[in-house]
Image (cartoon, rainbow, N blue to C red):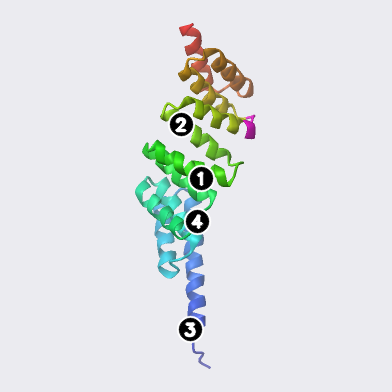
């Protein structure tokens, strides 16, 4: 007996194919095979051009493969569609940070932490963006918040110490660097900056 395929069946088949490409793309993304990930996400979007997760992951793959402008283009398309969430804003902000556009980075990273005030990575990158702009007080505020959220990460104390060093506050910087080393005695960045302060005093 022959069966005719209805429009609904064809649509369902297409959706299954789109999901297969999406899953493949996601697997390649987790394996850091970005070119393969991009190809599979693009194939999925040829079938289902409106899928949010596929677009989002495509943008992430573009970002990790150094195609910053293409990543921003996809993320901004999602933003125009009203798909605003903290991960989207964080990713766009992080791309601008990588590109050296710190003002733009701050604009997006602020949106991320406004939507989720527990967004640890958002505060870290926001602090970094302010640091690169030499706005050290704002950098310290955001590093403070990252330390509040995770007081066991030695790198966050090093970040804040560098901002205090840039402000000329060596005493506070030393306290932060010593705290970093108490959390992680192998933190070379903390050791080197502590030696630098000691050699200059």
- Say above or below: 114 vs 158: below
- The residue indicated by pointer 2 is 130
Q: Nearer the viewer, mark 2 or mark 4?
A: 2
**Dot 3 alpha-carbon crowd within 10 angstroms: few under 14, some 14 to 19, many 20 or more:** few
Q: Which residue is mark 3?
A: 7
Does any portion of residue 150 appear in the rendered image? no
Q: Is residue 122 magenta?
A: no
Q: Earlier in the sequence, mark 2 or mark 4?
A: 4
Residue under numbered circle 1: 111
- Is 196 placed above or below 75 here? above
Q: Residue at x 44, y 65 (%)?
A: 44
Where is residue 72 shown, x and y percent of the image? 39, 50
**Separation of disc 1 and disc 4 at Cα?**
26 Å
For the point 41% across and 53% down, the residue is 76
Looking at marks 4 and 3 on the same chain, the residue that comes earlier in the sequence is marked by 3
User: Which residue range is magenta in the image?
Assistant: 148-152
State which tag comes first along the sequence, 1 or 3.
3
Q: Which residue in the protein does label 4 denote?
A: 26
Q: Quadrant of residue 134?
A: top left
Mark 4 and 3 residues: CB-CB less than 8 Å, in contact?
no
Please name whichever residue, 195 or 49, is drawn nearer the observer in this view of the structure.
49
Q: Residue at x 53, y 34 (%)?
A: 124
Q: In the image, is residue 14 above or below residue 102?
A: below
Q: Of the two numbered discs 1 and 2 on the same chain, state the one appearing first in sequence.
A: 1
C-alpha gap between disc 3 and disc 2: 54 Å
Q: Which structural element holds mark 1? A: helix
Mark 1 near mark 3, Cβ–Cβ under 8 Å?
no
Q: Is residue 62 visible?
A: yes
| Mark 3 secondary-structure assignment | helix
As rendered, which of 163 and 37 lies closer to the eye?
163
């Amino acid at each position: 007996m022959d069966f005719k395929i209805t429009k609904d069946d064809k649509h369902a088949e297409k959706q299954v194919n789109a999901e297969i490409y999406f899953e493949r793309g996601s697997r390649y993304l987790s394996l850091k095979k970005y070119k393969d990930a991009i190809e599979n996400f693009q194939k999925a979007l040829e079938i289902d051009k409106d899928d949010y997760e596929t677009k989002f992951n495509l943008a992430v793959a573009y970002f990790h493969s150094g195609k910053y402008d293409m990543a921003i283009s996809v993320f901004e398309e999602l933003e125009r569609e009203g798909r605003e969430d903290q991960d989207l804003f964080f990713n766009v902000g992080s791309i601008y940070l990588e590109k050296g556009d710190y003002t733009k980075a701050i604009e997006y990273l602020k949106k991320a932490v406004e939507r989720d005030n527990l967004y640890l990575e958002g505060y870290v990158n926001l602090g970094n963006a302010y640091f690169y702009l030499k706005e050290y007080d704002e950098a310290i505020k955001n590093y403070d918040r990252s330390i509040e959220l995770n007081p066991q990460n030695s790198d966050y104390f090093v970040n804040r110490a560098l901002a205090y060093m840039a402000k000329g506050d060596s005493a506070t910087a030393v306290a932060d660097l010593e705290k970093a080393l108490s959390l992680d005695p192998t933190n070379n960045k903390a050791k080197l900056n502590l030696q630098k302060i000691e050699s200059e005093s």
